[in-house]
Image (cartoon, rainbow, N blue to C red):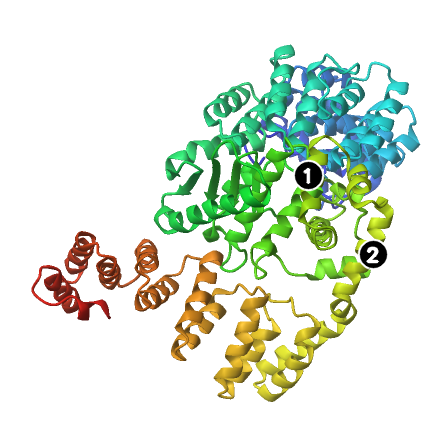
Amino acid sequence: MARSSELPVPCGAHTRACRVGAPAEACLKAKKSRDDSRLSTLDSLRHGGSSSGGTRALALVLFASMLPAQTLQEAETLWKARRYQDANAVFQKLVAREPRNSTVRVRWGRMFLEHWQADEADRLFNEALELKANDAEAMLGKALVSAELYGGNAADFAQKALRIDPKLVEAQELLARLALEDDNQTKADVEAKKALVLEPNSVQAKAVLATLDWLADKKESPWDPHAAKGYETAGHFFMLNRRYEESVAFYRKALDLDPALDSARSQLGLNLMRLGRDAQAFEQLKTGWDNGFQDDATKNSLTLMESEKNFVTFKTDRTVLKLNKKEADLLHPYIEAEMQRAIAVYEKKYRWKLSEPVKVEVYPDHEDFAVRTLGMPGLGALGVTFGNVIAMDSPSGRPPGSFHWASVMWHEMSHVFTLSMTNFHVPRWFTEGIAVHEETATSPEWGDRLGPDEIAAIKNRQLLPVAELDRGFVHPVNPQQVVVSYFEAGKICDYITEKWGWDTILAMLRDFGASDDTAGVIRKELKVEPADFDRQFLAALEGETKRTVENFDRWKEAVKRVDAALAGRNYDEVIRLGNEVRDLYPDYVEHHSVYEALAKAYLAKGDKAAAVQQWERYVHIGGRDPDTIMLLAKELTAEGNRPEAAAVLERLNYIYPMRTDQHQDLGEILLGQDDARGAIREFQALLAAKPIDMAQAHYDLARAFHLNHQPEDARNELIDAMEIAPGFRPAQKLLLQLSGGEQDEPAIKK
């Protein structure tokens, strides 16, 4: 067992060598010690004893005959009473007695699914299907597991279940739910009404139909299920649509009808946490935990809230910034300034004034950040927005250069505007598309580049129609489809902006705010049918990416040869081949980029100017490797091009501001340019990053304060420097100057 709240692992979870009979044997490992003597015979069979089918079958029969009589009804009764451990023991005995009964495994799997152990449930459904390939309930179980994990094949499993049993209402209800999760409202309506034909009192079908009305801002719905589970379903859909206040209201309504519905209580707590109401969230989550609802989301969220003591909060009239204490002094000036800049730019661009401050929470531990996104669709997120609350990874929480924190923050900040100005009615694809567009609109060097996954999707024509693009975010067929969907949505917004103008983007946002659907908005604002828009957009995208897509395989092979030549120190070949293929795929700036290989080859041949040129290309196309960026800055400084060196180091601050050398070098350049405020910022960051030579860092900050006419602050830093290094002559000299013993001017230069 992974932890105390989990049930024992079901049969077949760890031992997969033998299929028939072996699952029952595997279950025996979970039984209590009083059963050990009964298990010895079967254990020996599993670990090298007689393995004939007859002997195994006889052993199972003998074992089953020693067990007290148990029934599936008893297991179900214990399960419904939430006596999971007792029910689990009964299921174990039932499987041992009836090893070829698929129904027992299906029901056992459904209990594990309810008990937050989807992986174990899936194993049991697979075992049931091995015993009975056309078991509709087992196929439904597979669909439910996939849906729980936002898998892309949930609908396929549900449809297979319905082909086996056309009257399986739960499978039909699931199809309705999946369609609405994909924001295909027409299909959701059709599928839900099919479920009502099968079962006129279906709570879930009514919940889907009622949610369609409520999402369209209708106060009343004739489909109101008047049931706790129905309101829980409505709460789920409002959460998916980022309408967290309304989600909270529906979860509260569910709990009013059934205070024991702790799955709804947990979701209520998570949504309150997303809204920044941590005290209320803790109360709900703790109550659910004490009641026995102990899934990972509840456990991890409680743990995260208990770590609040490790964070510090900085407030202005427009912003709230929450940082871990260990890196707050370093990150605070950079992130807060960028928050304020983004808000000012976006208020003009979107013509929308925010009514409350924006809160940004920055997590140095990615696992803490992941807790904030539990229950949300999408994979590999770097940031997430809940109304006016943004949670994101810290630059220290990812490998250096692997992500651009400022780009992520501007991306998420755009969500604050698009969500609030549409009253949270904007579809996922459009708000994500605008956010991706904004990254490169802020700076062409920001945002993600054209990657191999996107190239493959374009080449194989796997991009989704615009009216179905939400599906790529919510129910991706594979992890790559999420990445591709972000890219596609961003390119669509680029295309609309270029062809119809930014005002059309704003008009579309207003339409979505009035609850119009994607197809209707495309027709209204672009004056084209969605299918025609898809064709036009795809033609434009294929034209833009044609050279890279067509030459991608050639480029891949050439890069291998470039790497081999570099490893063999054949620098002439690196230069020849690198220059030949670099521009076939200019967006590639990840590990082993051609830019870096060419720079190394040029340096080896003594041509620093050519190396600098390659590094500059790398940086301007969006390269983020801190070591490479620092090499460029140092070469520019050595050439005397200090303004450009400063600009390069400023870029690095937006990517990975955790190094000491970047702040030391940038502070020195800014000090030489008489930019006292910038130098103060950099030398304070240097101190916060804990350099090896703390005395020098205090002295450098004192010089910056002195330049900015802050003598008392300068004096304090000099005293700190001399406490560390009492014989530090430059600090002594400057302190004497500050006391009036010498002229000030010579002390400014290092």
Asked if residue 14 shows in the view, the reply is: no
**Residue 138 image offset from top left, x and y in percent:** 82, 32
> Residue at image x 87%, y 34%?
159
Q: Residues within 10 Å of mark 2 (few under 14, many from 20)?
A: few
Which numbered dot is residue 29?
A: none
> Residue at image x 54%, y 78%?
613
**Residue 289 image offset from top left, x and y in percent:** 53, 23
Q: Nearer the viewer, residue 11 or 79?
A: 79
In this rendering, is residue 403 above or below 383?
below
The answer to whether 170 appears left or right of 230 in the picture is right
The answer to whether 371 appears left or right of 310 in the picture is right
In this rendering, is residue 221 above or below 345?
above
> Residue at image x 76%, y 35%?
183
Q: Residues within 10 Å of mark 1 (few under 14, many from 20)?
A: many
Look at the image and tell me in which quarter the N terminus lies: top right
In the displayed orientation, state which residue is furthest to the left. Answer: 741
Q: Which residue is mark 2?
A: 461
Q: Closer to the N terminus: mark 1 or mark 2?
A: 2
**Residue 213 image offset from top left, x and y in percent:** 76, 22
User: Which quarter of the picture shows residue 9?
Assistant: top right
Q: Nearer the viewer, residue 679 or 557?
A: 679
> Residue at image x 58%, y 79%?
598
User: Which quarter of the picture shows residue 376?
Assistant: top right
The answer to whether 217 appears left or right of 680 in the picture is right
Q: Are marks 1 and 2 in contact (CB under 8 Å)?
A: no
Between the residue at mark 1 and the residue at mark 2, the CA separation in whole angstroms equals 28 Å
Report the amino acid beneath label 2: Arg
Assign a secondary structure to mark 2. loop
Q: Which residue is mark 1?
A: 509
